[in-house]
Image (cartoon, rainbow, N blue to C red):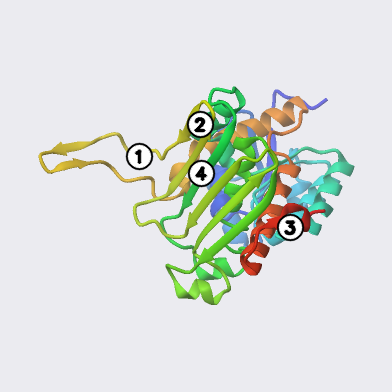
Amino acid sequence: MTDRSAPLGIALLGAGRIGALHARLIDQRVEGAAVAAVYDPIRSVAEKVADGLGGAPVAATAEQAIDAPGVEAVAICSSAGSHVPLIIASARAGKAIFCEKPLSLDLAEIDRALAAVAEAGVPLQVGFNRRFDPAHRSVREAVLSGAIGTPHLVRITSRDPAPPPLEYLKSSGGIFLDQMIHDFDMARYVVGSEVARVFATGAVRIDPAIGDLGDFDTAGVVLEHADETLTLIDNSRQAVYGYDQRVEVLGSEGVAASDNPLNHTGIVRTADGARAPTLPYFFIERYIPSYIAEWEAFVAAVQAETEPPVTGADGRAPLVIGQAALRSVSEHRPVDIAEIDP
């Protein structure tokens, strides 16, 4: 039996922006966990993060980090193309796994990773942090409790303040597999019913260079769930007023919705009108509490030897929906999920 008087030792695999964020939160805000090793293909990046943690060990390879003394779990925060090999290596080493989304952009590769996890019998949690946002979770709870009756119509808005770099977009999988994948997960989460059919459309309204990559910067999707609930999703790569994230469920007995927090609560009112503060600028400002909560849930699941709340199956389903959206926008028709995943 593992000694639970000591914190859960976590190897950080990938020390870029999101990896550095996770490392700081684990080190400073998550009780019962500690970063036990850091690895990044660029050693100087790993060293910078490790120095900020008070000198955590820096590994020369991912395998060395996975096998480092005191490591019981891994946090895979590297580029999407490296996720599957790292999941498999970690599973074979018997480590609990936290992996950022997406698990992969290739469905067959996801299945290969999940088979390795199942064979090893280790826990896997996927980093869909928005499930842990208190406001979004309240919408889910209103549906589960029956407070708003039977869900009829869901609206999900996700708008970034500015497009990511073109170099990032080249390997991101596009707006449906990168940005909207969070919303596909949120649709399944709040409705509690699988998606059966997808109709997607997209446009280039912000930067022609994004269109030159074969991608969109503005997109809309209609999801038909198995229980006949409809979900409407809109995404934009540029909302000049800030980071806009909202969820609404209309049910037979009422409505539940999550709105954006403001940077502060101060409001100025004059004869000319009212002025309120802006929205948080990006996800780091918006979702810190949800990142902390997802780590607390992961640590609790590992320590209790229970299934994490966001499973490998939860990581797989949004990619299937995203691939259906890509086919839909390409062929200008609704696409059944069964066409992608029989």
The residue that mark 2 highlights is 134
Question: Is residue 83 shown above or below 152?
Answer: below
**Counting other residues with Cα less than 10 Å from the Cα at mark 4, is it few (<14), some (14-19), or many (20 or more)?**
some
- CA–CA distance in space, label 1 to label 3: 42 Å
- CA–CA distance in space, label 4 to label 3: 44 Å
- Per the image, label 4 sits on a secondary structure element best described as strand
Which disc number belongs to residue 61?
A: 3
Residue at (54, 29) in percent of width and height: 252
Q: Position of residue 101 (x, y in %)?
A: 65, 50
**Counting other residues with Cα less than 10 Å from the Cα at mark 3, is it few (<14), some (14-19), or many (20 or more)?**
some
Q: Quadrant of residue 94?
A: top right
The residue that mark 4 highlights is 155
Q: Are marks 1 and 3 in contact (CB under 8 Å)?
A: no
Q: Amino acid at mark 1?
A: Leu
Give the residue at the far bottom of this rendering.
Answer: 212
Q: Position of residue 229 (x, y in %)?
A: 61, 40
Residue at (78, 28) in percent of width and height: 305
- CA–CA distance in space, label 1 to label 4: 21 Å
Which disc number belongs to residue 262?
A: 1
Mark closest to the chain's N terminus, 2 or 3: 3
The residue lying toward the viewer, choosing from 341 and 196, is 196
Q: Amino acid at mark 2?
A: Pro
The residue lying toward the viewer, choosing from 266 and 239, is 239
Q: Are marks 4 and 3 in contact (CB under 8 Å)?
A: no
- CA–CA distance in space, label 2 to label 1: 15 Å
Mark closest to the chain's N terminus, 1 or 4: 4
**Counting other residues with Cα less than 10 Å from the Cα at mark 1, is it few (<14), some (14-19), or many (20 or more)?**
some
Residue at (54, 48) in percent of width and height: 232
Left or right: residue 134 compared with residue 150: left
Give the residue at the far left of this rendering.
Answer: 271
Q: Nearer the viewer, mark 4 or mark 2?
A: 4
Q: Position of residue 195 (x, y in %)?
A: 68, 46
